[in-house]
Image (cartoon, coloured by chain):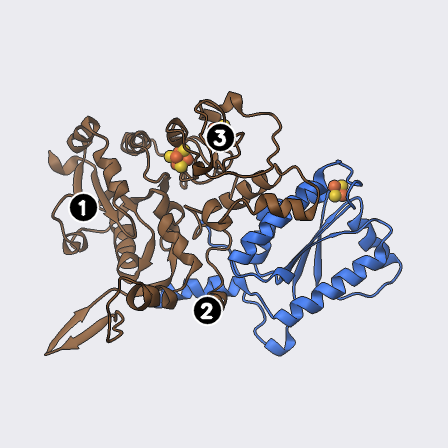
């Protein structure tokens, strides 16, 4: 029932490229990423962006699922406090982010792998600096590879 | 004729015995069950052995109710054996459904558990530092013990599971429904959890006192206050898992004036119960300032142990990262 198809992350440590899943709000951070693109800013290509209507739509399940499926980091981008189109969405995200960080800490996942940033539609340059900074920090930590760990858990049983 | 009756087996893996108690708690209903079926294997109550199961033809057990999580090689072998001998395999109770209380051991690894239990606990006397081994030779004899896996698993992480009976232990009423449904022959879709597919709040006698909007300035533990017997426990600042837990127990704990701890697992639309209650509780915090949010959230002392009390192995993350277990010891 839960046998998700998992692919092993590239094993070569030297060639490690972090895979970061980014959930961006449609009204601000996604537009900022768009702006960064149309302004031809260069930033690390390690981020897979998922557009949501509001950062408040980020169900904590999405974050855990991304890690479980092999993400090395998860980034949430939303409107600045007070600017959320749905008024309270980003505050809910902020509170969930704090509690989710406690859970991730208990589960042995480093703090730098999970990040929340407020980036308005005009801040294309901030998209660049945040992504570059996060990619470097996650690169320094090395791969998380929970998908491979799950595979190992499975193999432990298969061999016995 | 006996042989035409449905053949039922009960088995236990990593569990406390509470699920077998549920079978006994069918009370007079148990006599009806015994009249309607032939119990072919039930180690807690009847003297059948593993070799009796091995001698049965494949698929000859109508349904096996297996409780307990899977930790050892022996439990794993029994799960596989009973799977092949049974037409239907039912994960019975929280531990086999989602990992249960024994699943919290996934916050540790095999080495640290063995070290704590056999070497370091204050009540241990083990001057030669003997650790369990799977096979030991002495004086021409060999003694064997099951292997101890690094990770606790749910039953469906080992073998194909047809149905689930939730609860720690499952309420006898749910077991009765499950038995009636399975023996009635009109089988529900594979993967069905035998309990209503809505949140516990829905059947909670206090649901009318649960406010439309709620904000919490401090989470309380049951010893911190005199709990009002009428009002929604969440509204009193207690961590009640009701909003993220499947109904079916008739709110047994709430009726005992204690918050729900989540034993019936999530509804079918939710994959990770802990993430859902996290989402719910965090958004009840009133503040918009980081420091104040942290202060309020820090009043929940053990988030993983609270939100995943019965479901860590079945959750997205399944266990604490192994290399991190070592680093933090
Ligand atoms: S939160 Fe708990 S006490 Fe309140 S209605 Fe839901 S189950 Fe009942
Ligand atoms: S109230 Fe919650 S913890 Fe208690 S029996 Fe029901 S589901 Fe389980
Ligand atoms: S709309 Fe951007 S965070 Fe809510």
Residue A30, image x, y percentages: 78, 50
Q: Residue at x 18, y 26 (%)?
A: B28
The residue wearing badge 1 is: B44
The chain painted blue is A
Q: Is residue B303 left or right of residue A154?
A: right
Q: Earlier in the sequence, mark 1 or mark 2?
A: 1
Q: Is ligand 2 less than 8 Å from the beta carbon at label 2?
A: no
Question: Label 2: chain?
Answer: B
Q: Residues within 10 Å of mark 2 (few under 14, many from 20)?
A: few
Residue B328 vertical position relative to residue B267 in the rendered view, above or below: below
Question: Label 1: chain?
Answer: B
The residue wearing badge 2 is: B326
Front one among A47 and B85: A47
- Check the picture and name the quadrant holding the N terminus of chain B: top left
Check disc 2 and report its element: helix, strand or loop.
helix
Q: Residue at x 66, y 45 (%)?
A: B292
Residue A131 vertical position relative to residue B205 in the rendered view, above or below: below
Residue A87, image x, y percentages: 75, 36
Q: Is residue B214 left or right of residue B103?
A: right
Q: Earlier in the sequence, mark 2 or mark 3?
A: 3
Evaluate if marks 2 and 3 touch, with contact meaning CB atoms under 8 Å apart: no
Check disc 1 and report its element: helix, strand or loop.
loop
Give the colour chain B carries in the figure.
Answer: brown
Query: How many angstroms separate mark 1 from mark 3 (CA)?
Result: 37 Å
Q: Residues within 10 Å of mark 1 (few under 14, many from 20)?
A: few
The residue wearing badge 3 is: B233
Query: How many angstroms separate mark 2 from mark 3 (CA)?
Result: 38 Å
């Amino acid at each position: 029932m839960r046998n998700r198809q998992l692919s092993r992350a590239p094993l070569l440590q030297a060639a490690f490229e972090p895979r970061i899943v980014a959930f961006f709000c449609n009204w601000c951070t996604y537009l900022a990423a768009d702006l960064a693109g149309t302004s031809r800013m260069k930033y690390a290509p390690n981020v897979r962006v998922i557009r949501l209507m509001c950062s408040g739509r980020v169900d904590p399940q999405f974050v855990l699922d991304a890690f479980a499926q092999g993400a090395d980091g998860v980034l949430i981008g939303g409107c600045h406090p007070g600017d959320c189109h749905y008024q309270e969405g980003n505050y809910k995200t902020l509170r969930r982010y704090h509690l989710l960080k406690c859970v991730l800490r208990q589960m042995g996942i480093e703090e730098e792998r999970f990040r929340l940033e407020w980036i308005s539609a005009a801040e294309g340059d901030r998209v660049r600096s945040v992504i570059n900074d996060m990619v470097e920090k996650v690169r320094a930590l090395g791969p998380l590879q929970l998908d491979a760990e799950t595979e190992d858990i499975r193999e432990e049983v298969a061999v016995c | 004729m006996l042989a035409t009756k449905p053949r039922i087996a009960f088995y236990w893996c990593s569990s406390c015995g509470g699920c077998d108690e549920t079978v006994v708690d069918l009370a007079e209903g148990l006599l009806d069950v015994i009249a309607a079926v032939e119990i072919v294997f039930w180690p807690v109550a009847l003297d059948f052995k593993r070799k009796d199961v091995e001698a049965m033809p494949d698929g000859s057990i109508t349904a096996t109710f297996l409780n307990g999580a899977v930790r050892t090689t022996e439990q794993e072998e029994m799960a596989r054996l009973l799977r092949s001998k049974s037409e239907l395999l039912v994960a019975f109770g929280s531990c086999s459904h989602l990992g249960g209380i024994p699943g919290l051991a996934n916050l540790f690894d095999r080495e640290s558990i063995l070290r704590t239990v056999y070497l370091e606990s204050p009540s241990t006397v083990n001057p030669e530092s003997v650790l369990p081994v799977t096979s030991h030779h002495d004086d021409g004899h060999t003694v064997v013990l099951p292997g101890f896996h690094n990770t606790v698993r749910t039953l469906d992480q080992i073998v194909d599971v047809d149905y689930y009976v939730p609860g720690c232990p499952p309420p006898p009423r749910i077991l009765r429904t499950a038995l009636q449904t399975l023996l009635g022959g009109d089988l529900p879709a594979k993967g069905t959890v035998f309990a209503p597919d809505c949140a516990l709040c829905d059947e909670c006698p206090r649901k009318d006192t649960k406010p439309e909007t709620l904000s919490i300035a401090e989470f309380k533990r049951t010893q911190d206050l005199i709990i009002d017997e009428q009002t929604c426990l969440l509204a009193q600042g207690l961590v009640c898992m009701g909003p993220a837990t499947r109904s079916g127990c008739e709110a047994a704990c709430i009726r005992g004036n204690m918050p729900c701890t989540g034993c019936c697992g999530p509804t079918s639309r939710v994959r990770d119960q802990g993430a859902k209650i996290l989402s719910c509780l965090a958004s009840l915090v009133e503040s918009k300032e980081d420091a104040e949010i942290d202060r309020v959230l820090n009043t929940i002392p053990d988030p993983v142990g609270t939100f995943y009390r019965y479901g860590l192995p079945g959750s997205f993350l399944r266990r604490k990262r192994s290399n991190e277990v070592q680093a933090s010891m």
